[in-house]
Image: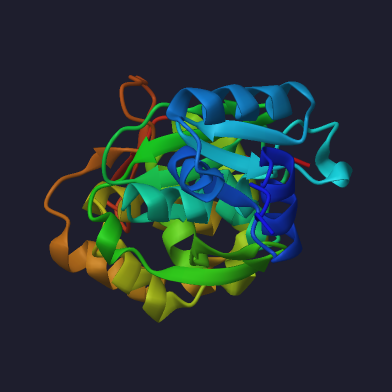
């Protein structure tokens, strides 16, 4: 008896039944033994019906019923597979990482991912993914977290703290940063913080040390302060690009305190 060729719908249902929720157009074409145009048309039809979504060209996610209103899989459930397919080192960072560590003051509006090179943002249904360029991405200390579809790499509390300072404009400003640090501080290891500081520009460490003190976590800054004392050759502004006539200097962190910061409640 001649074996029936699988349909596109049966193909994605078999994938889901096996626990896999991402695939590429070329994988679907091979499995279905059809032309590129035919598979593209069939996949487009399933997108229209809400059964799948495409967060990147040639890359598809199966959308279970519980995520139909979202219009896509949550970002943490497809970013690892997408990054693997693209051959890119990545980690979830900034506000997204803070949330994983239980320190997000507000729920992030976008899923934030750090890469070595620039990449266009993703809009998939209601899911938003923003990518940020981070030098030395291969040196960043990471922590694995389980998701319903696998494992995602997230910056450690120490690396997250440094990134928040380095990308303060992208996360809502210094008040937001110091607020998150007040919640993140209990998970920060002072020795690991110094190791992470070596992967970032030294001014990040100067600003972070001061902000941790403002967040009430002075006990976390002793070893970082030694690094700054020994290695920092220049005094830098707490908020780059802002002039303040009455700015005071903080000798411990070799910092010009040109703005006031406070923990939000």
Q: Is residue 204 left or right of residue 83?
A: left
Camera-nearest residue between 120 and 208: 120
Number of numbered discs overlaid on the protein picture = 0
Camera-nearest residue between 241 and 170: 170
Camera-nearest residue between 260 and 144: 144
User: Compared with residue 29, is residue 124 higher up or lower down, i.e. above or below?
Assistant: above
User: Compared with residue 36, is residue 6 higher up or lower down, i.e. above or below?
Assistant: below
Q: Is residue 91 left or right of residue 97?
A: left
Is residue 107 visible in the rendered structure shown here? no
Q: Residue at x 67, y 39 (%)?
A: 8
Instruction: Kindly give the residue lying farthest to the left in the view shown.
Output: 233
Q: Position of residue 19 (x, y in %)?
A: 69, 64
Q: Position of residue 87 (x, y in %)?
A: 31, 53
Figure quadrant of the C terminus: top right
Q: How is the image coloured?
A: rainbow
Q: Position of residue 22 (x, y in %)?
A: 59, 50
Q: Residue at x 59, y 22 (%)?
A: 41
Is residue 176 visible in the rendered structure shown here? yes
- Residue 103: quarter of image: bottom right
Figure quadrant of the N terminus: bottom right
User: Compared with residue 234, is residue 242 higher up or lower down, i.e. above or below?
Assistant: above
Q: Position of residue 238 (x, y in %)?
A: 37, 38
């Amino acid at each position: 008896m001649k074996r029936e060729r699988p349909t596109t719908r049966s193909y994605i249902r078999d994938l889901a039944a096996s626990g896999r929720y991402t695939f590429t157009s070329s994988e679907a074409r091979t499995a279905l033994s059809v032309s590129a145009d035919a598979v593209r048309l069939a996949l487009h039809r399933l997108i229209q019906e809400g059964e799948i979504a495409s967060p990147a060209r040639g890359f598809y996610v199966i959308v279970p019923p519980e995520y139909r209103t979202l219009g896509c899989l949550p970002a943490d459930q497809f970013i690892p597979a997408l990054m693997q397919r693209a051959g890119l080192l990545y980690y979830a960072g900034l506000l997204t990482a803070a949330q994983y560590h239980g320190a997000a003051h507000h729920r992030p509006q976008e899923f934030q991912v750090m890469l070595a090179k620039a990449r266009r943002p993703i809009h998939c249904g209601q899911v938003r993914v923003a990518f940020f360029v981070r030098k030395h991405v291969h040196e960043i200390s990471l922590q694995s977290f389980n998701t319903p579809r696998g494992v995602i790499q997230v910056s450690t509390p120490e690396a997250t703290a440094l990134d928040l300072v380095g990308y303060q404009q992208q996360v809502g400003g210094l008040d937001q940063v110091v607020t998150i640090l007040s919640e993140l501080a209990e998970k920060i290891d002072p020795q690991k913080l110094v190791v992470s500081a070596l992967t970032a520009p030294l001014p990040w460490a100067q600003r972070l040390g001061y902000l941790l003190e403002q967040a009430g976590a002075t006990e976390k800054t002793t070893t970082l302060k030694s690094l700054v004392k020994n290695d920092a050759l220049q005094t830098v502004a707490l908020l780059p690009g802002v002039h303040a006539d009455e700015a005071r200097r903080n000798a411990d962190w070799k910092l010009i305190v040109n703005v006031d910061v406070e923990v939000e409640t």
